[in-house]
Amino acid sequence: MRVANRPLGFILAVALLAGCVVLIAEVIGVAVHHSPLLVHWSTWYRWARKTRWDATVIRVWSAILIVVGALFLALELKPPRVTRLPMRSGDDATDAAVTPRGLAGLLRAAATGVDGIASATVKVRRGRAKVTATSAARGRPAADALTEPVTKELRTRLDSLELRHPPRLRVHIVPRGR
Amino acid sequence: MRADRTNRFALTLLGVLLLLSGAAAMAASAGAFGAAFSRRTLFANRVGGYVGQHGSWVWQAAAGVGLILALVVLRWLAALLIGTGRAGDIIVPDGDDQGTTILRPAALTSALTREISSYHGVEAAKGRVVGDGGNPELVLTVTAAASADLNALHQRIEAEAIAHARQALGLPSLPVRLDLA
């Protein structure tokens, strides 16, 4: 769920409701010869009757509509952030998944569990998990030597989860700073 | 009405309508429909002429559509403001006609989260029942310790806690959504 959708949806719903109420009230107002009732639509009507399509105000409002419409579409059609990575389950009625935070914690614990790794940071994004581990020893050769065992351990832990679509694993070992 | 889906649909539709109407107006303004058209006033076209001639019934029809739309929007607003998606009391199917057993969702989730919290490697567990009482769906969120074996935890929750819930409700295929955090 997109966080902005709820307030935007509320604003749109209220605006639509207000528009419908105004429309119904004005149609009733015309029928009983008491129009305009709520909004001075006759002013807009006179403006539209004398404004030409090639007027600057039409171009400005057209551009605004295009930009706002494109923004709404971009917001709604953008793929949502990954909130769960589905796991294989023995039962079709159970939809089990691990959250990106849960996976990051698991990979971080696996990386720091390898002898020679002091700390690790994990970023889980759509389709990939990036692990940056810091070696306890200084120097590039010491860090490079840890790449294989850390990758192997992370791969084993990732495989044990039995994810339906496991993320691509990227492991980077950096030597401890001074 | 699922408020989140409705929000997304309505906002996408709004985006499409704004984009298309803006593009059409810009095209008309730039002379894409003919230089003569771009010099006309906004209402000097077939639609404007038709509405002008048949205004009485067209506006009444528009008010009728507006009334229907207002009712739909009221339902949408109700789903936005008061809809939680949580299920009401769950009716447990009985094998005979001796009566009806009703289970409160909180009783089920409380028992389940207590059971799951007692498992090794679990830091916290939350649960809720969504859908309606006759067709419930269980949603569980389990926060595991960093050192926990998530796959083993998943297997245990499915084999024990979820199996117990399905047995208690008499629903062997109770849909369950389990998130391990």
Image (spheres, grey):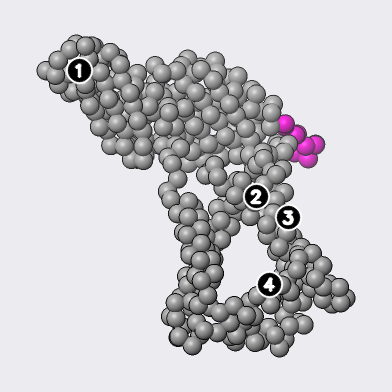
Q: Which residue is mark 2?
A: A10
Q: Earlier in the sequence, mark 4 or mark 1?
A: 4
Extreme left residue here? A141
* Residues at marks 1 and 2, CA–CA distance in whole angstroms: 51 Å
Q: Amino acid at mark 2?
A: Phe
Q: Earlier in the sequence, mark 2 or mark 4?
A: 2
Q: Earlier in the sequence, mark 1 or mark 2?
A: 2
Which percent across, then down, holds residue A31? 84, 77
* Marks 3/1 same chain: no
Q: Which residue is mark 1?
A: A175
Which percent across, then down, holds residue B3? 63, 49
Q: Which residues are magenta?
A: B96-104
Q: Is B100 colored magenta in this rendering?
A: yes
Is residue B155 visible in the rendered image? The answer is: no
Seen in the picture, residue B6 relative to A177 is either above or below; the reply is below
Classify mark 1: residues with Cα within 10 Å, few (<14), some (14-19) or many (20+): many
Give left or right: position of A37 versus A3.
Answer: right
Q: Which residue is mark 3?
A: B74
Q: Nearer the viewer, residue A48 or B15?
A: A48
Q: Is B15 colored magenta in this rendering?
A: no
Q: Nearer the viewer, residue A31 or B110?
A: A31
Cβ atoms under marks 2 and 4 closer than 8 Å: no
